[in-house]
Image (spheres, rainbow, N blue to C red):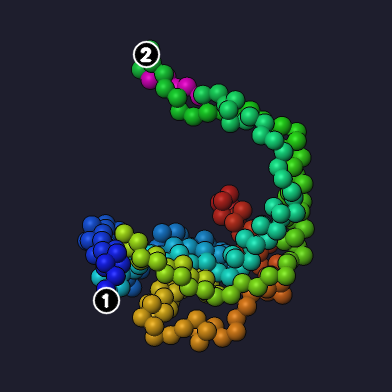
Amino acid sequence: MKNRHLEKLRAQCRLALKRDRRSFDEGGVHARHVVEPGATLSWWSDFAFVLNGRLITLWWEHPRMKYSDEIAECAWRESGPAPPEDGWLENATPIMRAVGKSRKKCVGHRSPARSDAWRQYFDHHNAIEDRIRADGIDFEARPSLQVQTLRWCVGVDICVPIEIRSSEDARALVSLARRLLKRETTLESEFPGYRYGRENWLAEAGLRSGDVIARKINSTGM
């Protein structure tokens, strides 16, 4: 017996694709983000492609991204509760800009400086996170795949150890996603026994530092 709710979502997906105006490259891939020039390591990105008449939105992250997110969570837990709110949002003053000869409009808000307690808290938190990132944590990130049917697309959360440095790499990822969705392969057969843990994180420390330097060079145009 068919699931009426699921069938309705699938019909909505097909209708949404007809109205979609995004462009796809010659490989049938739409990339929402530009590959960062000079970067060695990949972290996350979003892609889209069409399968069986429906738009597939691919939310991809590398296992190192999951590991990095877990480090951030550990740092927040170790930092403890934040100080009481200091009213920096409530006390923001509007920034007015002249419109014509006699009128003004608000184009933004200027917030006062944070309190000493908040600055000390974030200095403390940043020191903790820097230490944890240098030492690593006992955590393993594994390949994963989650699929959900939405009204406008089929959303696919995928975590696989693939580096995305070019359009060819993006097409390889999309090709893998297609085969996974069509059940022509599995994550275990593609990445047997893969785990990203402390050893991987520490081994990539130099590459992460190099990417930071490359990013600064690209931003300054040197």
Magenta stretch: give its range: 95-99
Residue to which mark 2 is pinned: 101
Q: Residue at 60% across / 81% down in the picture?
A: 194
Is the magenta region chiefly helix, strand or loop? strand
The image quadrant of residue 153 is: bottom left
Q: Between residues 45 and 115, which one lies in front from this camera angle?
A: 115
Q: Residues within 10 Å of mark 2 (few under 14, many from 20)?
A: few
Three-letter residue code for mark 1: Met
The residue mark sitting in front, 1 or 2, is: 1
Is any atom of residue 166 visible in this view? no
Q: Is residue 79 left or right of residue 32?
A: right
The image quadrant of residue 172 is: bottom left
Q: Residue at 66% across / 67% down in the picture?
A: 207
Q: Is residue 163 left or right of residue 81?
A: left
Three-letter residue code for mark 2: Lys
Q: Residue at 50% across / 87% down in the picture?
A: 189
